[in-house]
Amino acid sequence: MFWHYLLDILRYYILPILDILAVAFLLYKTYMILYGTRAMLVLKGLVIIGIIFFTSLILQLQTLNLLIRVLFTYGIIAFIVVFQPEIRRALMRVGENKFFTTLTKGDASTLSEIIDAVKFLSKKKTGALIVFKRQAGLRNIESTGVHVDGSITSELIITLFSKNSPLHDGALLIEAGRIAFASCFLPLTEKKAPRRLGTRHRAAIGLSEESDAVIIVVSEETGRISIAFKGDLKT
């Protein structure tokens, strides 16, 4: 009898609360991922159409109800096709690990080489983009760059970003403890960014929105060092 009582409490009280909390959490995470993107505007439009739809059901407006059903049917398909990057980004966020996952699979000396190079580039106000590949594949980025496959040294990084280097434009891609590609082009963010942020910063934010990569940016104008991760830019 006691166990039946506990099962009834679990079934009728605890599980519904957990269900509501789970749905609320998913809605909140979806909102945070889409916030500030063009998909958010479309999502707001779908919510308004949904309100009109339920209103038409209550008031029995048959013609309006039929029209909205057609819009919903084809609108969802169009939403998936047009906003594929945002959907892919949402799925990436679900499966990603914490920020402090090893970035380069190298030792402390390797990381020291990168830090020394970034400090030098910052001091000389030489613009730079350094991408640390983690778990997400970046083949679309690799295809835009030049294959290097070089050891990570501060001298090589500085040389590649030198204004006299033919590979100074674009980003450096570090993978498995080596400099894999140079002069890679990154996707620009669609979020509204402050005017003070240049193309490098917008590109860093854009890639961090679509993958779990960590991107270091050195401003050519100010020499300021920034880090882009999960769609945020920290300076």
Image (cartoon, rainbow, N blue to C red):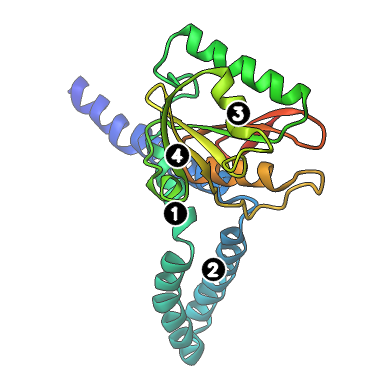
Seen from the viewer's position, the closer of residues 219 and 28 is: 219
Seen from the viewer's position, the closer of residues 113 and 98 is: 113
- Residue 197 at what x, y percent from top left? 76, 44
Vertically, is 97 above or below 116? Answer: below
Q: Nearer the viewer, mark 2 or mark 1?
A: 1
* Residue under the point 46% across and 41% down: 211
Assign a secondary structure to mark 1: helix
Gap in angstroms between the C-alphas marked 2 and 4: 23 Å
Answer whether residue 228 is visible to the viewer in this image. no
**Disc 3 and disc 1 in contact, CB within 8 angstroms:** no
Gap in angstroms between the C-alphas marked 4 and 1: 10 Å
Residue furthest front as drawn: 164
42 to the left or right of 80 = right
Q: Quadrant of the N terminus?
A: top left
Kind of residue indicated by mark 3: Thr
Q: Nearer the viewer, mark 3 or mark 1?
A: 3
* Residue under the point 52% across and 81% down: 56
Counting residues from the start of the chain, the first of labels 3 and 1 encountered is: 1
Gap in angstroms between the C-alphas marked 3 and 1: 38 Å
Picture disc at residue 87? 1
